[in-house]
Image (spheres, grey):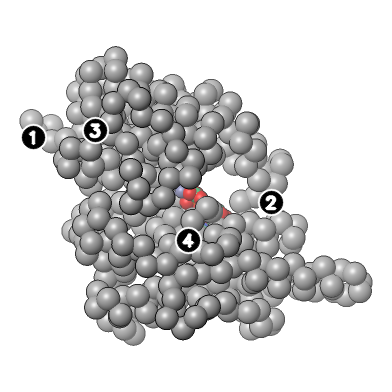
Amino acid sequence: MDNKDIIILAVESSCDETAAAVVKNGREVLSNVISSQIATHSLYGGVVPEIASRQHIKAIDWVIDAALDEAGVKKEDIDAVAVTYGPGLVGALLVGLSEAKALAFALDKPLVPVHHIEGHIAANYIQRKDWEPPFICEVISGGHTHIVHIKDYSDFEILGHTRDDAAGEAYDKVARVLGLPYPGGPRIDALAKEGDPEAVLFPRVVLESDTYDFSFSGLKSAVLNYVNKAEMKGEEYNRADIAASFQQAVVDVLVEKAVRACNERGLKKLALAGGVSANSHLREEMLSACNKEGIELCVPDLVLCTDNAAMIGSAGYYEYIKGNIADMSLNAYPGLKLGER
Ligand code: KG4
Ligand code: ZN
């Protein structure tokens, strides 16, 4: 390893994945270890915060050791410890944060606070080593839906956000009504492949013509009403058609807003981030819309779309070189907004 290389150990525990990674110079992933709690939470139909915290406590030590081992890096050789400090579930965040603080203190290394969404955005820097700001990023996860103008590595302008449910939340709720287990996104993605996206015309809520805000709760309710009505009347309905029609309504809105933001800002570069960007239909439709408009599209690999610590290591690198170092009083902020410190 070069003397000038910056090695970051990153820790992520904001929701239901306990994750640690070692990242070199913000772009090269030396290890990316994820311990998923999905199997446990799916028994309850969603993430149970108290169970999440307990599972993080069980996993955090071995996940960090495994990340260091796999990277072939000794604790003493890292330059900084980066950690997600918000947004997320407070109890879950505190597990990763306490561990990162203890490590930074014991090793006498800087502690770098990372915003979870900034991490999702940074997944694109790992995906494409040559990908640089400025660009438009559509952040679509279980808890967030944002269109962001990325002006520089940590200079963001939020152009729009959801006024109610996040895109992933709508996926998860619709999946539940269709009898699919948590998390619903990947299940709907798979089921929709067997259905007709034009079978049912669900509403595309674009709101005012000039806004980048989203609203998914009307669409979610329309699907729930459709299914409930059919069940009450004892009518048959095709679950695959509903999944495909719902998904098409989400994808149409996500594509329209992202492409419009690029064109209006005169930025011919678009990146996707967050769990919903793993959606296969969205990836296809976004790519074809971008090709038509001459927009270059960057989409992280599946493992970098959903929660992981490599993305935190990348965002952490850019915070570190800017000198954003926290002291031992750093707390967890469950409702932290993007661009807030
Ligand atoms: O980014 P993420 O892992 O966690 C948050 O920060 O929220 O996103 C999780 C969300 C869940 O709602 C999940 O259903 C959704 O991403 N998701 C998908 C797919 N894979 C995960 N949604 C649609 N299609 C997928 N293939
Ligand atoms: Zn996330």
Q: CA distance from mark 3 to mark 4?
A: 28 Å
Marks 1 and 3: which is nearer the front? 3
247 relative to 327 in the view: left or right? right
Marks 3 and 4: which is nearer the front? 3
Mark number, residue 325? 3
* Kind of residue at badge 1: Lys
Q: Position of residue 276 (x, y in %)?
A: 49, 60
Q: CA distance from mark 1 to mark 2?
A: 47 Å
Does residue 127 appear in the picture of this structure?
Answer: no
311 relative to 251 in the view: left or right? left
Mark number, residue 181? 2
For the residue labelled by badge 2, is the local secondary structure a helix, a strand or a loop? loop
Q: Position of residue 227 (x, y in %)?
A: 79, 69
* Kind of residue at badge 3: Ile
Q: Position of residue 4 (x, y in %)?
A: 8, 34
- Seen at 47% across and 29% down, the residue is 94
Marks counted in the figure total 4
- Seen at 41% across and 50% down, the residue is 337
Q: Are marks 1 and 2 in contact (CB under 8 Å)?
A: no
Q: Is residue 177 above or below residue 59?
A: below
Instruction: Give the quarter of the figure containing the N terminus.
Output: top left
